[in-house]
Image (spheres, grey):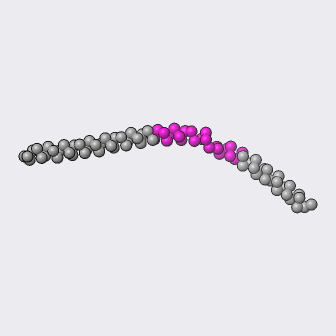
Amino acid sequence: MDLQAAFNIMMLIAGTFGGWLMKTIYDSIGELKVSDRRLHERIETLPGIYVRRDDFAAFAGRIEATLGRIETKIDHKVDK
C-alpha cells in the first residue's frame, strides 16, 4: 500500500465521521425546532388553564368577606 492509498483511506474515514457528526447535529437542531414549536403552543394555552390574576383577586375578596362574617358570628357567640 503506497502513501496515497493510506491517505485516501484516512480521508474516507474522516469524511464518514464528519458526515455522521454533521447529520447528528442537523437532526438535533430539527428536534429542537419541533420542541420549541410545541413549547410555544403550550405557552399559548397556559392562560386558559390557570386562574387569571383578576379572577383570583375576586375569589380572594369573597373568601375574606366570608371569613369576616364568620369572625363576627364567633365574636357574637363569645359575647353571649
- Relative to 79, residue 57 above or below: above
33 relative to 77 in the view: left or right: left
Quadrant occupied by the C terminus: bottom right
Q: Position of residue 13 (x, y in %)?
A: 20, 45
* Residue 4, x across and y down, in percent: 9, 44
The residue sitting at 69% across, 47% down in the picture is 57
Please state the horizontal and vertical placement of residue 34, each as a whole percent of the image.
Answer: 43, 39
Q: Which residues are the magenta region? A: 36-58
State the image quarter where residue 55 is shown: top right
Query: Which residue is located at x 82 percent, y 56 percent?
Result: 71
- Residue in view at x 53 percent, y 40 percent: 42
User: Which quadrant of the view contains residue 74?
Assistant: bottom right
Furthest-front residue in view? 1
Residue that appears at 28% across and 43% down? 20
Residue lying at the far left in this picture: please name it. 2
Q: Is residue 40 magenta?
A: yes
Q: Please check the rendered image and state whether residue 46 is part of the magenta-colored stretch, yes or no.
A: yes
Q: Is residue 69 left or right of residue 58?
A: right
User: In this rendering, would 76 be left or right of 32?
Assistant: right
Give the overall secondary structure of the magenta segment. Answer: helix
